[in-house]
Image (cartoon, grey):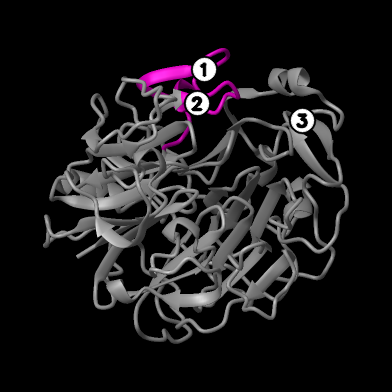
Amino acid sequence: MASLLSSISRIPPSILGAIQFRCYHDIPGRFRVLAWGSGAQGALGRPDAGDWYEPEPVPGLPSDLIGVAAGHYTSFALTARGQVWSWGANEALQLGRRQRDEAYTHSPPGPIPGLPPIARLAASGVVGFAVTTHGELHAWGTSRRGQLGLGPGETAAPAPRRVEALADAAAVTQVSAGWGHALALTVDGGVWAWGWPAAGQLGHTLPPEDADEEALAAACVWAPRRVHALDGRGIVQVAAGYDHSMALGADGRLYTFGDDSLGQLGRREADVGVGVEGGATIVWESGSSRPGQAPLASQGGAAPLLGIPRAQPGRPNAAAPTTHTSQPGPADAWLVRGAPAFAKVTAGLGHCLALTPCGQLYSWGWNGAGQLGLGAGEAAEVVATPQLVYGLPRNRNALLAAGRVHSVLVTDERDEQDGAELKDNDHAGAMAGMCASWGSGANGRLGTGQLEEVHHPELLPMLDGEEVAGLAAGLDHTLILAR
């Protein structure tokens, strides 16, 4: 366990779809997983597959839990020994336990065999990913769009397999999964993308605008490929939405690319940007990656917001990522301009959440059910630029999660002052029982016991006083690690 925790401490906090957790060196065996929302296909871990409208414990899990993660209708838990447990939908082998469940019936919690000690998790609707404590990436599930990343024609992996395309790269520190694409971050600040490319969400591949299904399938990227346009930008976090991608620099600058049909890129105007792939110039069509035009808000000369991980044992040594050099390049077309510096981001299906260094929450994108938390006065279904969410205490270490049409935040019951130290997930301590949710209440997504839409953050009364160590959201369900 000591070796596992030592390795985990070198990995930066994860984003949407990936695991968010804190490790408790002195209190093992005290945390449990609570779940609520849609129980479709067993995502809540109960045999009845019904909906839960308030947080309820997931039965049958081990006692030494340190983290949770969620796919669309799948759920995962991580133990202090680095073992992964999974439950929920398994018709695409996305639980990593070999046995396919064609009938969409309940698959109870069980361990995934054959994995080395794991430090990070992420999942989509049909694929699961795990980052080992030595920075290797493993994948399992089924994808005809290349999301597994295992190479050309590799569409199914009943059990976890190592992603060989990253074997000679620097250690992987984070992975995030969208609908048909995935992103990985390596210790040298490299961003890697693969899978379905239709909207430009890979950052290096964009089929013709009029490409049919056959042409799109032929353009799939079957193994991780580096997004060279982001080299030298000091990237410390990546997040994959449904069909869009985000990369956060150590200086707080946010780069977004992919589908912008719901304003999820956070840009003001549609325009044409430029990307670079293997030395060739690619013109990104308007309607895909849309750069903004407003001047960038002053960053105030801020130092890097998140710690840079060191190289992992047994992996190639690499220099730490460099911060933004201010030299023009293709990624400047992806920059979210006019926004504050951000310290943490997460992506839902069509909306995004972000925390600033002083702990303020911003949101943008699709707002069809109030999932941006901007209040009933915000009638627009699409909010194209980051907006401040009011009514929450400032906490730069808050946990964020975004689903299809709901959002969740866990924070301390206090305001943090400007300049408070941004702690990593190993040293931030337990969150003192303040969990808020907003958006659609259908299927119990909000965990408050009500079914109505809520357009502003509302506290979950059942979690009052609970200490929370992890948070994850699938499309319509939420997991929390609490005691």
Q: Which residues are magenta?
A: 142-171
- Point out which mark residue 227 bears: none
Residue 328 seen:
no
Q: Within the magenta stretch, is there residue 384? A: no
Residue at the spot 47% in from the left edge and 42% down from the top edge: 72
Q: Residues within 10 Å of mark 3 (few under 14, many from 20)?
A: few
Left or right of 300 on screen, residue 473 = left
Note whether 323 is above or below 179 in the view shown: below
**What type is the residue that disc 3 sits on?**
Gly
Q: Is residue 8 visible?
A: yes
Secondary structure category for the residue under label 3: loop
Q: Earlier in the sequence, mark 3 or mark 1?
A: 1
Residue 170 among magenta residues = yes
Q: Position of residue 359 (x, y in %)?
A: 49, 76
According to the picture, the residue beneath numbered tag 3 turns out to be 279
Checking the image for residue 155, the label placed there is: 1
